[in-house]
Every structure is written in structure tokens, then in C-alpha cells.
């Protein structure tokens, strides 16, 4: 894995046959779909992968089969966020055993913690991890925001970078300023709309959920941002906004983005939209709206392509 880690690294949806059974065929179709469209890495067991909702045995099976399918063609990152240190280490060991390249870990998300407790936790975890790690800032889910000085301490503890899903663009810029162009530390945004600005001002890539469905769109947006092709960026913003305004806005459930992405993949025939509890899949009416949204987004993409 070359550092800093760069590019489009989709947070892979976890295809399921039921809440306890991995859909291996759907998993292979999804990974092939992503690799064929040029993604630069794959992130397993993140938020869109429903990682915290899956049993440890299922997580192990997913890592094993995903790594077998990917065969080292792109780096594999594995989410190990958990409420306990030992839980994170269990998944980290599975990642090592099956050939993943690194792990991604958010702070424990049950007890309220101060920044020093977060730093101490990461230091303790880092000493026992069998793989390199990336920090994960996801305050909407963990109730803990990794402050800039904390991130600098995590870098000292061995973090290779950070995936920031705070949705706070000023915070991302503050990280860039504090890190001062450190070539060994990757700044990855988890907010799809921030990708161009992140790349233009010193970031390295993105973990966009929508890349599960439209990987080539986000690869093109990455390349346009990397080469500072402002006209292409402007064109590609329209289908990305269409994803936000249609696919991500169908369900009224708080996890509507994950639901929209998984249902879109079901409509495309890649995998079913079965969710792990406590999430529930979209109903038939919502699924029909997803079909309409996909047509609208594809029309927007065709229009962009015709103007390129």
C-alpha cells in the first residue's frame, strides 16, 4: 500500500441473504463492478457496510471472501470500530489473517469520553494492532469529535491517516493546515460533495457511499480534482447533487443513505437490499422511487458525458 493512500475507496455495502448469512455471489458481483470501474481501494465494514450490526463470524467471512476476490489488486481497509478494545482486536486479527492492508477505527461509541481518554485508547490499541491503522472521525455515530490536536497525537501513535465523516469542511481545512502537507499521512473525506475541495486544497481521496452504485462517476470526479480540471468538476457536480437530492432523500429513516445505496444495488441486480437489524429494508413503494432516481441520475450522467 503506497502512502499517502489516494483515490476513491468505496465503503462496500455488505450483501446479505438474511441477517446472519453473507451473499457471496452478490459480494463478488459488487466487487467486480467496482474494480471494473477503476476504484483505488475498498473499505469493508464501514457505516454503509453495516459493520457494527454484524456478528464477528459474519465479519470474518466477509473479510475472507472479499480479500479472495480482490486478490491484492487494490488496497483493502477493514473497519474495526467497536465498543470494546477486544472486539476491535478480534476483527483486526481477522483482517490480518485474510490479507487486508490496514484497519480503520473510530473511538468506542457508548461511554462519553474526553479527548485525553480517546488518545489513551488509540495508543493502547495501536500497541496491539496486527496491521497499520487509520483513524475514523464519525461524530454523528460515536458522539465524539476527534479534535485537531487529538489527530496530531494519533499520528504520533502511528496512524497512517484519517477518514473524516464529520461533514465539517472547516475542520477538514484545519487538519490540512495543522498537518502542513505531511506526505505520510492521508486525509480522506467521507463527505462526497467535499471531494473536489478536499483534493484541490491538499486532501488525498474520498470514501463515497455513492461509489458503490456509480463508481466511474466518482473516479472521474477524483481525476478531475487531482488535475484541477475545474470545468469537468463543475459538470460532474450535477449528477452527484442528483444522488443527494433523489437517491439519498427517499426514505425518512435516519439511515436513508445506506438504505438508498443498498436498494439501488438491488434494482441493478447486483445484490439484495436485505439489511442487518436494527435497520429495515425499503418497502415496495420506496423501491419504485429508487428506480426512478436511478433513471434520473443516469440521464444526468449521459448529459455530462455528451458535454465532455
Image (cartoon, rainbow, N blue to C red):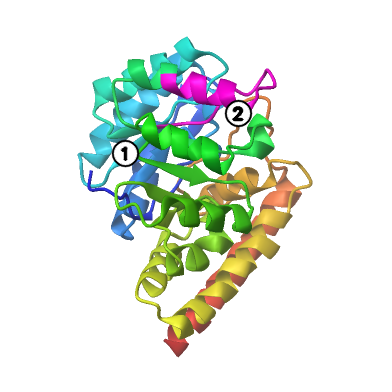
- Judged from this view, the residue extending furthest toward the right is 252
Asked whether residue 159 appears in the rendered view, the answer is yes
Question: Quadrant of the rendered structure where residue 206 is?
Answer: bottom left
Q: Position of residue 18 (x, y in %)?
A: 55, 25
- SS at mark 2? helix
Above or below: residue 157 compared with residue 48? above
- From the image, tell me which residue sits under label 2: 115
Q: Is residue 75 above or below residue 143?
A: below
Q: Tell me the residue that label 1 is attached to.
A: 76
The boundaries of the magenta stretch are 104-123
* Residue 11 image position (x, y, % from top left): 46, 44
The structure residue drawn at horizontal position 45% and vertical position 33%, both measured from the top left corner, is 153
The label shown at residue 295 is none
Mark 1 or mark 2, whichever is nearer to me: 2
Quarter of the picture containing the C terminus is bottom left
Q: Is residue 110 magenta?
A: yes
Distance from disc 1 to disc 2, alpha carbons, whole Å, reads 29 Å
Look at the picture and state if 7 lies above or below 300: above
Circle 1 SS class: strand
Q: Relative to 2, is 111 on the left or the right?
A: right
Compared with 52, 213 (above or below) is: below
The x, y position of residue 286, in whole percent, is 72, 50
Q: Position of residue 164 (x, y in %)?
A: 53, 46
Residue 262 located left or right of residue 65: right
Amino acid at each position: 500500500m503506497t502512502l499517502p493512500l489516494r483515490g476513491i475507496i468505496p465503503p462496500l455495502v455488505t450483501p446479505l441473504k438474511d441477517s446472519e448469512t453473507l451473499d457471496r455471489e452478490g459480494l463478488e458481483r459488487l466487487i467486480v463492478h467496482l474494480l471494473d470501474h477503476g476504484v483505488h481501494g475498498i473499505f469493508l465494514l464501514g457505516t454503509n457496510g453495516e459493520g457494527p450490526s454484524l456478528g464477528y463470524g459474519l465479519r470474518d467471512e466477509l473479510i475472507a471472501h472479499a480479500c479472495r476476490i480482490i486478490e491484492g489488486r487494490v488496497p483493502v481497509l477493514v473497519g474495526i470500530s467497536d465498543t470494546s478494545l477486544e472486539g476491535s482486536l478480534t476483527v483486526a486479527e481477522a483482517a490480518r489473517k485474510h490479507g487486508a492492508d490496514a484497519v480503520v477505527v473510530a473511538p468506542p461509541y457508548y461511554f462519553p469520553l474526553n479527548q485525553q481518554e480517546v488518545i489513551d485508547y488509540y495508543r493502547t490499541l495501536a500497541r496491539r494492532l496486527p496491521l497499520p491503522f487509520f483513524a475514523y472521525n464519525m461524530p454523528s455515530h460515536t458522539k465524539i469529535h476527534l479534535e485537531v490536536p487529538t489527530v496530531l497525537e494519533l499520528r504520533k501513535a502511528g496512524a497512517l491517516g484519517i477518514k473524516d465523516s464529520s461533514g465539517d469542511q472547516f475542520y477538514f481545512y484545519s487538519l490540512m493546515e495543522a498537518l502542513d502537507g505531511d506526505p505520510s499521512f492521508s486525509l480522506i473525506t467521507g463527505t462526497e460533495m467535499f471531494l473536489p475541495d478536499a483534493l484541490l486544497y491538499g486532501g488525498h481521496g474520498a470514501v463515497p457511499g455513492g461509489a458503490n452504485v456509480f463508481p466511474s462517476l466518482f473516479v472521474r470526479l477524483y481525476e478531475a480534482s487531482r488535475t484541477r480540471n475545474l470545468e469537468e468538476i463543475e459538470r460532474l457536480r450535477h449528477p452527484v447533487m442528483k444522488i443527494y437530492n433523489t437517491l439519498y432523500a427517499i426514505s425518512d429513516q435516519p439511515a436513508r443513505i445506506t438504505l438508498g445505496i443498498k436498494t439501488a444495488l438491488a434494482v441493478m441486480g447486483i445484490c439484495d437490499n436485505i439489511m442487518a437489524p436494527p435497520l429495515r429494508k425499503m418497502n415496495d413503494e420506496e423501491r419504485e422511487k429508487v428506480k426512478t432516481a436511478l433513471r434520473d441520475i443516469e440521464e444526468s450522467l449521459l448529459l455530462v458525458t455528451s458535454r465532455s
